[in-house]
Image: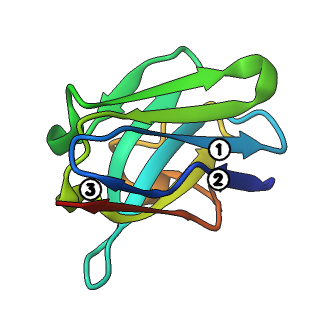
């Protein structure tokens, strides 16, 4: 279903900011960011549809912003006021089908393509 390549992960101090990027090899109708910390389940963080409708998990609302550059087939995640609990491997996910998946867009089952991940580490 196409390749996804994430970048932008880094080590920062609490309160800092990072912007993650995900470049898709082909246009996708829905894209999302997930994260997974060691020992934890993968968690949906933010999602965006082709109509630019967005969805965020509660813990990042007001701090993270997901956006899409259609011309570049690139999704971004602007992360502000980072907290140690935001530390995780962040994954880009994409869904090619234009149909609603019948689940929350923060559910991993909606997506068929995944990137390799980019590490975000936030120190206190």
- Could you tell me which secondary element the residue under label 2 belongs to? strand
Q: CA distance from mark 3 to mark 1?
A: 18 Å
Q: Earlier in the sequence, mark 3 or mark 1?
A: 1
Q: Position of residue 8 (x, y in %)?
A: 58, 49
Label count reads 3
Q: CA distance from mark 1 to mark 2?
A: 4 Å
User: If the image is split into quadrants, where does the N terminus sit?
Assistant: bottom right
The residue that appears at 72% across and 20% down in the rendered structure is 70
Q: Are marks 3 and 2 in contact (CB under 8 Å)?
A: no
Q: Position of residue 87 (x, y in %)?
A: 31, 63
Q: Which residue is mark 3?
A: 86
Residue 105 visible in the snapshot: no
Q: Which residue is mark 2?
A: 6
The residue that appears at 81% across and 53% down in the rendered structure is 2
Mark 1 residue crowding within 10 angstroms, few (<14) / some (14–19) / many (20+): many
Placement of 114 over or under 110, stated as above or below: below
The residue that appears at 69% across and 33% down in the rendered structure is 74
State which quadrant residue 58 falls in: top left
Residue 21 visible in the snapshot: yes
State which quadrant residue 103 falls in: top left
Q: Which mark is residue 22?
A: 1
Q: Position of residue 64 (x, y in %)?
A: 32, 33
Placement of 68 over or under 51, stated as above or below: below
Q: CA distance from mark 3 to mark 2?
A: 17 Å
- Could you tell me which secondary element the residue under label 1 belongs to? strand
23, 107: nearer the viewer: 23
**Relative horizontal placement of residue 123, taking residue 79 as reference (left or right):** left
- Could you tell me which secondary element the residue under label 3 belongs to? helix
**Relative horizontal placement of residue 119, taking residue 122 as reference (left or right):** right
């Amino acid at each position: 279903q196409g390749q996804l390549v994430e970048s932008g992960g880094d080590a920062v101090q609490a309160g800092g900011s990072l912007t993650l990027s995900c470049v898709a090899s082909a246009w996708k109708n829905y894209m999302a960011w997930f994260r997974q910390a060691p020992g934890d389940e993968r968690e949906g963080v933010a999602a965006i549809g082709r109509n630019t409708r967005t969805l965020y998990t509660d813990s990042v609302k007001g701090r993270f912003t997901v956006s899409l550059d259609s011309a570049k087939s690139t999704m971004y995640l602007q992360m502000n006021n980072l907290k140690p609990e935001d530390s995780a491997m962040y994954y880009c996910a994409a869904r090619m089908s234009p149909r609603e998946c019948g689940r929350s867009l923060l559910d991993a089952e909606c997506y068929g393509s995944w990137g390799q991940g980019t590490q975000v580490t936030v120190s206190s």
